[in-house]
Amino acid sequence: LAKTTQPISMDSYEGQEVNITCSHNNIATNDYITWYQQFPSQGPRFIIQGYKTKVTNEVASLFIPADRKSSTLSLPRVSLSDTAVYYCLVGDKDGGSQGNLIFGKGTKLSVKP
Amino acid sequence: DAGVIQSPRHEVTEMGQEVTLRCKPISGHDYLFWYRQTMMRGLELLIYFNNNVPIDDSGMPEDRFSAKMPNASFSTLKIQPSEPRDSAVYFCASSPRGRGDGYTFGSGTRLTVV
């Protein structure tokens, strides 16, 4: 499984756009990039997934350059409730023989008023 | 759907005692995962099942840990005997077809071994 590297922590203020970058230099052809969010005392929850270029949903955008060796999660106009740990994961989209997700340490985002 | 249900939410036990954690996955999800989370090590995958069959248990730390999935709606993670270093939050997650975008986690069981 491709290893990911992301900043340990980030600080932001309410209303700002936050971009969290993840490096995955040995990403495989079949790998997708997935981001999860974890609030204190809760399990992680899915935010967004992409393969290349840009993906957008009601929560975030995911930017993936052509070489796919990195990706950037973009959170528009964050609020205090976006304070959480954000995990970047790389792996097969479907299960098969590799139906599991390996989480790194994640990025702890702190949003201040 | 009520989501992934774990019990108990909190468990405090004495060293040497047996601990059993329980999980009810989302109906129709054919993958089930057990994770452990600590400050030091983050989220670690312990074991996962596909259609009730254990597929990969390489993350299980020691023989003191065992997991079963007797049917599609129930799984247990057992620690016997428990040790203080087992103190952590244990999460169960389920997914349809193991898709990376389809994991649903439970609220976790916070285990404290004293």
Image (tube, grey):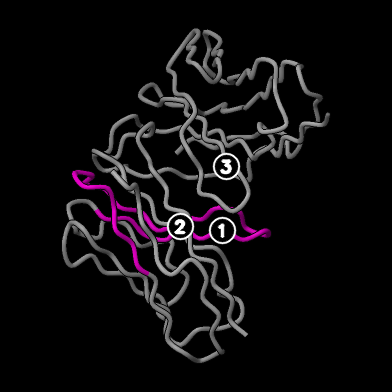
Residue drawn at point x = 29 percent, y = 53 percent: B25
Q: Report the disc number at residue A38.
A: 3
**In the image: residue A60, left or right of residue B65:** right
The span from disc 1 to disc 2 (Cα, nearest Å) is 8 Å
What kind of secondary structure does the magenta stretch mostly adopt? strand
**Residues at discs 1 and 2 in contact (Cβ within 8 Å):** yes
Q: Is mark 3 on a helix, strand or loop?
A: strand
Q: In this view, does B111 lie above or below A1?
A: below
> To which residue does mark 2 refer?
B91
Q: Pointer 2: residues within 10 angstroms few (<14), some, or many (20+)?
A: many
**In the image: residue B6, left or right of residue B74:** right
Task: Say which amino acid is labelled 3.
Answer: Gln
Observer-nearest residue: A18 or B2? B2
**Residues at discs 3 and 1 in contact (Cβ within 8 Å):** no
The span from disc 2 to disc 3 (Cα, nearest Å) is 12 Å
**Which quadrant would the C terminus of chain B be assigned to in this image?**
bottom right
The span from disc 3 to disc 1 (Cα, nearest Å) is 12 Å
Q: What element carries label 2?
A: strand
The stretch of residues the image draws in magenta is B22-49
Please provide percent x and percent y for residue B98: 29, 40
Q: Is residue B91 magenta?
A: no
Please provide percent x and percent y for residue B66: 35, 74
> To which residue does mark 1 refer?
B37
